[in-house]
Amino acid sequence: MNLYAACSFLLAVLGFLGGLIWYANRAGRNSARVDTSQRNTANANAATQAAHAMLNARTNGIRTDNQLLDTLDKGAF
């Protein structure tokens, strides 16, 4: 009976360690996915801001000094 208790204890410890390794591996993969997702979001936001700035530059065009002063006087710049 002592042999059965030792074997069952050994199997329980091995099962616990296997579960712990599985959990740690899964948590690491989830962390990597979150990091990648945040990095992709930051890159997309930077690209969107650059495209928006280019669109504003194209829409507003080059202004003369008088047009720029009028815009500044209106407070719309």
Image: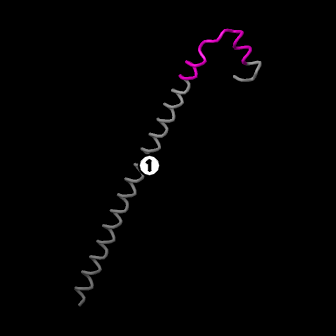
Number of callouts: 1
Q: Give the labeled residue for mark 1.
A: 34
| Image coordinates for residue 58, horizontal then vertical, percent | 55, 18
Q: Nearer the viewer, residue 33 or 13?
A: 33
Q: Quadrant of residue 24?
A: bottom left
In reply to whether residue 55 is colored magenta, the answer given is: yes
Q: How is the image coloured?
A: one colour
Q: Would residue 53 be found to the left or right of residue 4 on screen? A: right
Instruction: Residue at 25%, 88% (x, y): give it.
Output: 2
Query: Which residue is situated farthest in the bottom direction here?
Result: 1
| Image coordinates for residue 65, horizontal then vertical, percent | 69, 9
Quadrant, the C terminus: top right
Instruction: Residue at 42%, 52% (x, y): give it.
Output: 31
Q: Would residue 2 be found to the left or right of residue 53 on screen? A: left
Q: Nearer the viewer, residue 62 or 29?
A: 62
Residue range (magenta)? 54-71
Amino acid type assigned to the residue bearing label 1 in the image:
Val
